[in-house]
């Protein structure tokens, strides 16, 4: 053996992953995970609401029903009864449904099959950070779409589409992560029409849609696209959803609904990624479908109360010149502070006061939002909301002075 020399791992990495860095949020969460810090920073569903007993019973039921087949390799497309059920809910054939190992896998695989280097991908400003992470290795060229209380500004979208050859638009229309905002009906219709006219595919990422605690449910972009196209296999909207926020995230069960050409390529990409979503997990989720409506009610009620409580405390404890979104569902709200306040720089001060949030700028593909922050209300107790919002109000007031 010759002398050991240091191996140059950096040079070994593929060019497409050289720009990959640790998620800004993960780094931030490390600081905020001290046990005495009240954290509004996390993005996890409330674990005390998980239907533990039902999952235990569903596991036994799946093993009893299927025997060794529950532990065998299975088809890439997914467990047939689960695909059937999802198809029925959406009024489409099961063959247009692909089961995925978390909707995060769907984002990665859709990036893989749709994005060539330099393709223009339109994203909301701000958008879901995990989508940016999934798409980044495929080297897209991002264009940010301005947003306001009603979601994406569709006039701006129209202008962008006139001058930019876009391949794909990615959006979270219901109770968006990170802002909690919902795309209004009129804009949904225009977004679907405009993208169809310009030949732009749309990924509608909808993990939170079932968790509406106030207001009227709105039609999905997918259903509007279906109406416009008149055929499931001509719909240019790709719909993605998940059992992570309605049941439990740890089973990693999610799905995509799309036109056959997209599903066929997704199947091939998924074969290369993990062959199939764990067989037993899909069977457990299928056994749990009868309790899903009651479980959704439980989660909605709890999150709705927590959101109301947090907004009430913000109204009394934050300085008057702060603004926040009013989510009608989901897990997050978004706070905008006066210009000039940098929430990333302010975070250590908040942690000193034993409260944490996620600064807003990592959610922007091309930068912005330095004066914004994401707050999650879904895991906080009333007492934590009171103390945490008070401490955060004091931190903001100090920064303003
Ligand atoms: C908008 C959005 N999409 C996708 C995901 C990933 O969810 P899943 O657990 O289904 O992979 C999340 C998780 O937080 C999310 O907020």
Image (cartoon, rainbow, N blue to C red):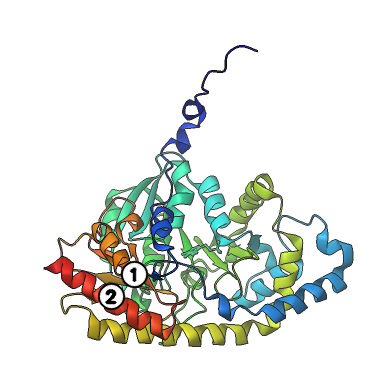
* Image coordinates for residue 378, horizontal then vertical, percent: 45, 77
Q: What element carries label 2?
A: helix
Left/right of residue 74 with respect to residue 304 in the rendered view: right
Label 1 neighbourhood size at 10 Å, few (<14), some (14-19), many (20+)?
A: some
Q: Is mark 1 on a helix, strand or loop?
A: loop
The one of 110 and 103 positioned closer to us in this rendering:
103
In three-dimensional space, the C-alpha distance between marks 2 and 1, rounded to whole angstroms, equals: 7 Å
* Image coordinates for residue 176, horizontal then vertical, percent: 40, 69
In which quadrant of the rendered image does the C terminus lie? bottom left
Identify the residue at horizontal 39%, vertical 66% (top origin). 41
Label 2 neighbourhood size at 10 Å, few (<14), some (14-19), many (20+)?
A: many
Residue 153 shows in this picture: no
Identify the residue at horizontal 29%, vertical 69% (top origin). 353
Residue linked to disc 2? 391
* Image coordinates for residue 205, horizontal then vertical, percent: 48, 64
In which quadrant of the rendered image does the N terminus lie? top right
**Dots 2, 1 in contact, CB < 8 A:** yes
Left/right of residue 321 with respect to residue 307 in the rendered view: left
Identify the residue at horizontal 44%, vertical 55% (top origin). 26
Residue extending farthest top:
2
């Amino acid at each position: 053996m010759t002398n050991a020399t240091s191996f140059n791992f950096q040079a070994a990495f593929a060019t497409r992953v050289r720009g990959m860095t640790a998620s800004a949020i993960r780094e931030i969460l490390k600081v905020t995970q001290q046990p005495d810090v009240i954290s509004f920073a996390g993005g996890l569903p409330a674990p005390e609401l998980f239907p533990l007993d039902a999952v235990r019973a569903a596991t036994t039921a799946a093993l009893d029903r299927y025997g060794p087949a529950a532990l065998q390799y299975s088809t890439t497309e997914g467990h047939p009864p689960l695909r059937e059920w999802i198809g029925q809910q959406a009024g489409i054939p099961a063959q247009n449904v692909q089961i995925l190992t978390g909707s995060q896998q769907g984002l990665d695989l859709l990036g893989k099959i749709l994005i060539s280097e330099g393709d223009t991908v339109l994203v909301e400003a701000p958008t879901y950070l995990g989508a940016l992470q999934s798409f980044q290795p495929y080297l897209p060229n991002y264009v940010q779409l301005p947003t306001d209380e009603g979601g994406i500004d569709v006039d701006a979208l129209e202008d962008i589409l006139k001058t930019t050859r876009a391949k794909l638009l990615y959006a979270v229309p219901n109770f968006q992560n990170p802002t909690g905002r919902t795309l209004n009906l009129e804009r949904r219709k225009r977004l679907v029409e405009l993208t169809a006219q310009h030949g732009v595919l749309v990924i509608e990422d909808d993990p939170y849609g079932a968790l509406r605690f106030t207001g009227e449910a709105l039609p999905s972009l997918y259903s509007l696209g279906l109406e416009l196209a008149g055929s499931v296999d001509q719909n240019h909207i790709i719909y993605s959803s998940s059992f992570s926020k309605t049941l439990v995230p740890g089973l990693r069960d999610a799905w995509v609904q799309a036109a056959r050409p997209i599903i066929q390529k997704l199947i091939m990409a998924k074969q290369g990624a993990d062959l199939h979503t764990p067989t037993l997990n899909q069977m457990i989720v299928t056994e749990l479908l009868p309790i899903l409506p009651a479980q959704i009610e439980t989660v909605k009620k709890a999150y709705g109360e927590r959101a109301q409580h947090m907004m009430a405390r913000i109204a009394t404890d934050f300085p008057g010149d702060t603004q926040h979104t009013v989510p009608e569902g989901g897990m997050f709200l978004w706070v905008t502070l006066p210009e000039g306040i940098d929430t990333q720089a302010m975070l250590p001060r908040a942690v000193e006061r034993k409260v944490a949030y996620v600064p807003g700028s990592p959610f922007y593909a091309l930068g912005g939002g330095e004066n914004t922050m994401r707050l999650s209300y879904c895991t906080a107790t009333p007492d934590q909301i009171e103390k945490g919002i008070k401490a955060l109000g004091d931190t903001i007031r100090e920064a303003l002075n």
